[in-house]
Image (cartoon, rainbow, N blue to C red):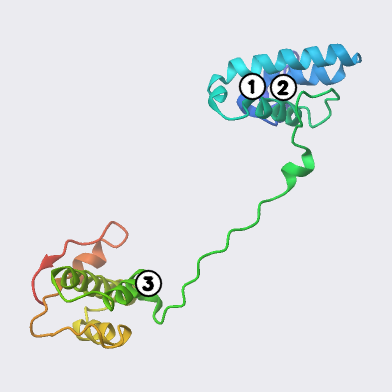
Amino acid sequence: MTFEGLDYNTSRPKMRMPEYGRSIHLMVEHCVQIPDREERKRCAETIINAMARMKPEIKHQQDYMQKLWDHLAIMSDFKLDIDYPCQVTTAEQIAVKPDSLPYPKHNIPVRHYGSLIFRSLEHLKTMKPGEERNELIRLVANQMKRNVVNYGNSAPDNERVISDIARYSDGDVIIDPEKFVFEYINIDNRSSKKGKGRSVNHQQKQ
């Protein structure tokens, strides 16, 4: 059902830059249709001043006047024929998509451990024995254990982790299974809270 005299936004043309509002877009449409070139330029300058008052924060940006004139050209669908005070961005330039950024790829032997683990193992190979190296070994070993459990949804396998650390560090990091204390992972608790956060780990031997 339609009612004569009522004008809804849903029935109006889509705004190219909604942040400026319908009134500015109507002013731009009027400006494009002005036959006199000089009058059309003065109208455009008036619109620019109104846009600047609506967006005072843009004045803190570099080349903000360039941005305002670019926005005016966009709202006019690049149909506003005036002598612009600056070189506005063309429709063709806007349509050009930036080059895709290459996704970082890491050639790692085992995906479920992640690249950070293998970078840490490489770093361990360069470290001198001491508390700092021992602490990093503890962090890496426990993270590898968590990764094994999360990836395979299986029981913790301390021996597998110890073996993998020795293997992927080229034998530079050897863990004594009789002395090393892994963090405890509650499998049942972890499974019931999957997707709600990692379960609390306790420092105890498993």
136 or 185: nearer the viewer: 136
- The image shows residue 157, relative to residue 11, as above or below, that is below
**As drawn, is 12 to the left or to the right of 191?**
right
Tell me, for residue 114, which label it has, or none. Answer: 3
Q: In the image shown, does 54 or 82 lie closer to the viewer?
A: 82
Identify the residue at horizontal 39%, vertical 80% (top origin): 110
Residue 21 marker: 1
Which marked residue is nearer to the observer: mark 1 or mark 3? 3
Amino acid found under the numbered disc labelled 3:
Gly
Label pair 2/1, CB-CB below 8 angstroms: yes
User: Mark 3, residues whose alpha carbon is within 10 Å: few (<14), some, or many (≥20)?
Assistant: some
Q: Residue at x 16, y 64 (%)?
A: 201
Q: Which corner quadrant holds the C terminus? A: bottom left
Image-quadrant location for residue 92: top right
Q: What residue type is labelled 1?
A: Gly
Instruction: State the quadrant of the N terminus.
Output: top right
Amino acid type, callout 2: His
Q: In this view, does 95 lie above or below 203?
A: above
* Residue toward you, 89 or 186: 89
Mark 3, secondary structure of its residue: loop
Query: First in sequence: mark 1 or mark 3?
Result: 1
Residue 127 visible in the current orientation? yes
> Is residue 164 toward the left or the right of residue 110 in the image?
left
Mark 1: which secondary structure?
A: helix
Between marks 2 and 1, how big is the CA–CA gap? Answer: 7 Å
Nearer to us of marks 3 and 2 is 3
Which label was assigned to residue 25? 2
